[in-house]
Image: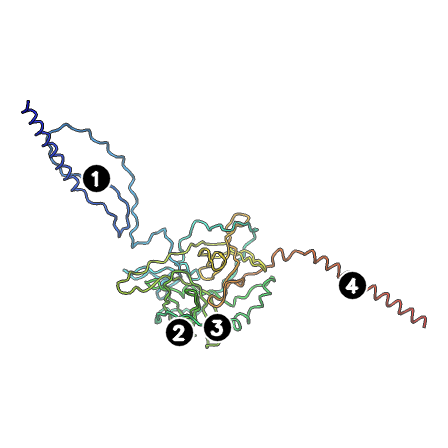
Amino acid sequence: MALRSADSSRRAVIMLSSLLVSTSIAFAGVPVATADPIDDDTSTEAVDVEPEAVEPAPEPEAPEPEAPEPQAPEPDAPAADEPDPGAPEPAGPQQESPGAEEPGNEPNAGEPAPNEPSAPENPAPDNSPGTSDAPPASEQRDIPDEDPINPDLNVADAPDADARAAETGNAVEVNPAVASTAEIDDLRDIVDSQIISSTTSSSSSTTTSSSWSQSVTSWSSSWVGYDTYYRPIIINPYDSPLQVIYTYDNAPRIVTVNPLQRVVVDAKTPGVYSFTALTMKDPKTVSTASVGSFSGGGYKPAPGQPPPAKPAAPKSFENVLVQLRYTTGNSKPFRVKKLYDLGDDPSVGGARRVLLDGEVPAWGQWAKTTKGEDLFAITKTEQLPGLSAPAEGPLPGYKVQLLANEESSKPSVWDGVWIWVGIATAGVVVAGGIVFAVLTARRRRVQ
């Protein structure tokens, strides 16, 4: 009896030892599951690994566990260095590259891809930055449907040969200091007297049904690009010096670009910056004025510093219906090829800031027509970024007709009162004249 008990104990020990050896071998053969930081794949898909066979001591067979139901494999995540096809392009004009057209050429192999711009469609990177689902309806008010007009867009122009020469010119890195108040005031006065006042009527005329001047043009998207570090590059395709005025870190800046040359602008702070570009025949004479925009957020990394991340692109919408809705009057609706929504701007009363065709800044709110179409109602624009504040004024480059408000065109109750007062006064004057004539005739007869 004791012998049988000893044999049973010995057999149990052997079986337990075999089971432990088998288990340790099996776990030793399973690799550790980790996410590949290069592929940016955070999935933890389980992999069955066959353990090396080990013959255990005879024991009763245990029932086999049921196999788990097969699951659909998860899609592979894109690699960290590969662009997400669904992600929007970064904002800004186009990449650096001689002879670049609207978007910008591909960067050199092994270097980070620069933002693709969309210059007159500009601050949004390439010509087709990601479009979002639908504009936010922050102001759901119905606007009567009208037949939209197609305004001419006056874009700055220069000879193709000069533009190509500027694209291959020396690129000078610039980090301008804050401009003085006197410098900004002098430039504003020059532009007002030589560009604005000489071609535009007074602001009071904007309440009439007259076409606004196109004295200030829209900057050409092909004249702004980006280097491999996402720094904006501005070219000067003119044979006169170009002065670029913009606000950066809440302070005015002035960059001078020599004729047929280009500059690389230091703008590490992310954001979209609108500028005024002036061609200067001499320090006191301006020949042209244009409005454009570029994106910041790029920088040249110092030794050991990681390269900059690709700036995020703003939301964009194509073929958008817009309308000027000023206190002095409204315009007929018109369409822009592309509109970039930059979000709410606390500095302008929380209005949404947008870029029309990638270049011209404007502020307002999203609304809907009575037919349910999205429309952006513009309440302010910036005719001379860096030199003037957002206000009701002409849209640079767009020839838009401003009509009087319906309210202002309706006859007032006092209008009728004054009409009757005028008629009564005229009647009194006429009657008085008749009485005077009769009395005068009688006196003559008596005499």
Discs 2, 4 touching: Cβ within 8 Å:
no
The span from disc 3 to disc 2 (Cα, nearest Å) is 18 Å
- Identify the residue at image location x=15%, y=37%: 23
Residue 356 appears anywhere in the view: no
Of pointers 3 and 1, the one earlier in the residue sequence? 1
Other residues around mark 3 within 10 Å, as few (<14) / some (14–19) / many (≥20): some
Badge 4 element: helix
Dot 4 amino acid type: Ala
Residue nearest the observer in this picture, 21 or 410: 21
Which one is in front in this view, the residue at disc 3 or the one at disc 2? 3
Of pointers 2 and 4, the one earlier in the residue sequence? 2
Other residues around mark 2 within 10 Å, as few (<14) / some (14–19) / many (≥20): many
- Identify the residue at image location x=6%, y=27%: 6
Q: Quadrant of the C terminus?
A: bottom right
Instruction: Check disc 4 and report the residue beneath it.
Output: 426
Of pointers 4 and 3, the one earlier in the residue sequence? 3
Dot 1 amino acid type: Asp
Residue 258, label in figure = 2
Dot 2 amino acid type: Asn
Instruction: Check disc 3 and report the residue beneath it.
Output: 187
Measured as percent of width and height from the top left, residue 104 is found at: 37, 61
Discs 1, 4 touching: Cβ within 8 Å:
no
The span from disc 2 to disc 1 (Cα, nearest Å) is 67 Å
